[in-house]
Amino acid sequence: MKTYKINLIPGDGIGVDVVNEGVRVLNAVAEKHGGLKFQYNNLPWSCAYYLEHGKMMPADGMKILRDCDAILLGAVGFPGVPDHVSLRELLLPIRTGFDQYVNMRPIKLLPGLVSPLKNDKIDFVVIRENSEGEYCGRGTSDENGAVQEAVFTRKGTERILRYAFEYAKANGMSRVLSATKSNALNHSMVFWDKIFNEVKAGYPDMDSRQMHIDALAGFFIMHPDRLQMVVASNLFGDILTDLGSAMLGSIGISPSGNINPEGTYPSMFEPIHGSAPDIAGKGIANPAGTFWAIAMMLEQLREKPAADMLMNAMCSVLKAGVATTPDIGGKGTTTSMTDAVIAAL
Ligand code: NAD
Ligand code: IPM
Ligand code: MN
């Protein structure tokens, strides 16, 4: 019997619901598989924790968090604590502190999903830089104005671009598209483009292009079938992936893997959506993004058959379309959808 230790950070709002249901599904996968077991450490770090303790996680939080095989996170942020405080004290320090510099976000119209677009050939991956760029947090502000800096190091830029090309090559893709904005961002994105051109020279068989982020956003809607691999900076990748998940019918669908490729630190898996205060407590959060994130986690733990088992069960529930949540046209709840996935398993 193989046992994995999973650190859970349910966080805030619907993050708590989707992680609770995610654990039920993960246990069902383990039972069905027969050779797997999961041990959980449920960490209460959240905005509620902040209001009680004055911080989002304890001083030794990163040490506690490191001791595991993977981290499953729901969502962080809730009215009552400023978003830049909650996210900059919990989610973002984990991504940078554990050098999870690859953020992998698959955008795929799974069987049963209905895209709001006419063109429904949607199957691509966004690889987002996850450790620096526009999220470096540097700058100044006072009454008279604000300056927000961005940091693009050679090391950080080169490794993410190379990762995207290697991933594309390993997964039979023939096209890599880099998101830029070098017409206006005369330092950061000109540098990004320069490194892109250097890296792409090593992949002569790949159709590699760059596109300005504004045009690329339009391209997502008009020609999603031509996308295979999209590589983007931290901020651009963030925005493009909410767009991407919406192209699948709901931002509750896409998953996000925060990967430390070297395995020096644990990787972290989460849905791409946030804590959704507008529907929190209503029991209607779509758990698909979390289930898909769990499948990514299983794959990263080299438990591919278990990951496939879960994705197949979820797809059959999406196809039936009965127990699913209202955001994708179903009549169900977070719990009914989870029950259906467990039954399908
Ligand atoms: P959001 O993703 O929470 O919600 C945007 C819209 O999508 C809302 O109308 C919401 O109801 C809907 N939605 C989101 N997830 C859904 C799901 N699973 N099922 C059905 N509908 C869903 O984005 P927001 O409103 O910009 O942010 C809310 C809070 O979450 C903020 O504090 C923000 O900073 C935080 N946030 C956290 C994360 C994270 O922890 N990874 C990600 C994004 C936003
Ligand atoms: C995401 C979220 C975060 C991000 C926020 C909450 C800081 O939007 O994971 O996509 O921008 O990375
Ligand atoms: Mn986002």
Image (spheres, rainbow, N blue to C red):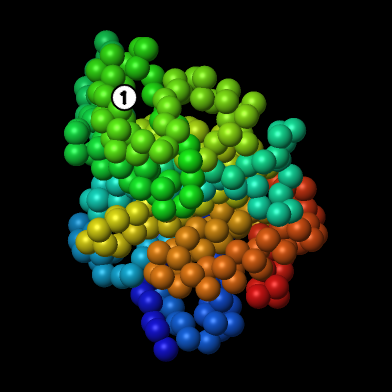
Under tag 1, what secondary structure? helix
Can you say which quadrant of the picture contains the C terminus? Answer: bottom right
Residue drawn 61% across and 56% down?
A: 288
Q: Relative to 62, is 306 above or below?
A: below
Can you say which quadrant of the picture contains the N terminus? Answer: bottom left
Extreme residue toward the front, this view: 205
Residue 162 screen position, x and y as percent: 30, 42
> Residue at label 1?
193
Answer yes or no: disc 1 within 8 Å of ligand 2: no
Task: Inspect this view and state whether residue 273 appears.
Answer: no
Residue 16 screen position, x and y as percent: 51, 59
Residue 139 screen position, x and y as percent: 22, 24
Residue 159 screen position, x and y as percent: 26, 42
Q: Relative to 49, is 237 above or below?
A: above
Numbered label tally: 1
- Res 151 → quadrant: top left
Residue drawn 30% across and 28% down?
A: 197
Residue drawn 46% across and 68% down?
A: 298
Task: Inspect this view and state whether residue 194 appears.
Answer: yes
Q: Relative to 113, is 135 above or below?
A: above
Residue drawn 46% across and 82% down?
A: 36
Question: For this view, does 124 lie left or right of residue 193?
Answer: right
Question: In the image shown, does 316 or 43 lie closer to the viewer?
Answer: 316
Please tell me how crowded label 1 is: few (under 14), some (14-19), or many (20+) other residues with Cα within 10 Å.
Answer: some
Question: In the image shown, does 338 or 246 lie closer to the viewer?
Answer: 246
Residue type at tag 1: Asp
